[in-house]
Amino acid sequence: MNHWDEQAANWIAWAREPGHDAYWHYRDAFFELVPAPGESTLDMGCGEGRVVRDLAARGHRVTAVDASADLLAAAREADPDGDYRRADAADLPFADDEFDLVVSYNMLMDVPDAAAVVREAARVLRPGGRLCLSLVHPIADAERCMDGDYLRTVRFHTEVEQGGLRMVFDGWRRPLSAYTRALEDAGLVIEALREPSDIETPEFPLFLWMRARHA
Ligand SMILES: C[S@@+](CC[C@H](N)C(=O)[O-])C[C@H]1O[C@@H](n2cnc3c(N)ncnc32)[C@H](O)[C@@H]1O
């Protein structure tokens, strides 16, 4: 069973409990990086759909994909008129140049081949379109699974219990340059980069946000 199908019930409770996780605190600042609505926006790795609903509330016409059938079912239930499709972000069911904006919020650490996903995002973006990414900052993950070699890509497995809710996160911690290189190789030019600080340890960033433009 897919990790996210296994964690679907936990994630729905985690993501929907008001104020529970970092999304609630950071989302307004993240959306400041997101361009004004164009004709069509894609959310890659939408989960139970909170980013899609927030994009729609800001005027975006959103299509969303996720690999988890259970999370998509929850997203559709919360937003029956939304356009949700089951797909692997590394193999998107869309033609070239279909979107003027692709958003991916905290999904790229979950995939084994982040460069393949970034290439797919670039393929479905029109020239001049933007990719907006949020990642858990490599430094924040390095703290949790430091193996003495920042530059190596390593698997992580984290079990968290917080406010009575439980989640298991599995993924890959990569150095920052793995992501910037993936953007560069896909023909995407970084035009904004932010490292919002961790609320609990303000001397370190929690997330890495980038907006990149398709040349
Ligand atoms: C941490 S959750 C984030 C969900 C949502 N973006 C949010 O911030 O609430 C990561 C999501 O990425 C999805 N995902 C992981 N690998 C994927 C892939 N290869 N293709 C599409 N979605 C994927 C998972 O199913 C999960 O819904």
Image: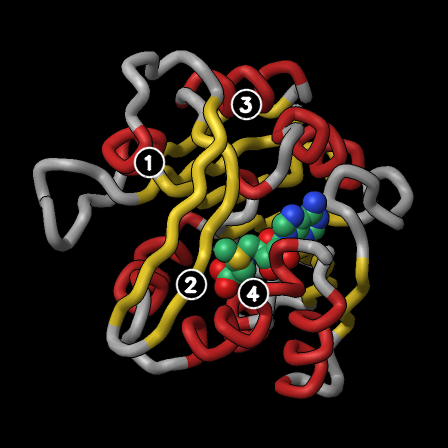
> Dividing the picture into quarters, in which one does residue 210 lie?
top left
Q: Is mark 4 within 8 Å of ligand 1?
A: no
Q: Secondary structure at mark 3?
A: strand
Q: Residues within 10 Å of mark 1 (few under 14, many from 20)?
A: some
Say whether disc 3 or disc 4 marks the residue closer to the N-terminus: 4
> Dividing the picture into quarters, in which one does residue 1 lie?
bottom right
Say whether disc 2 or disc 1 marks the residue closer to the N-terminus: 1
**In contact (CB < 8 Å): disc 4 and disc 1:** no
Disc 2 target residue: 167
Cα distance in 3D space between marks 2 and 4 = 7 Å
Disc 1 target residue: 141
Disc 3 target residue: 189
Say whether disc 4 or disc 1 marks the residue closer to the N-terminus: 4
Identified by mark 2, the residue type is Met
Q: Residues within 10 Å of mark 2 (few under 14, many from 20)?
A: some
Q: Secondary structure at mark 1?
A: helix
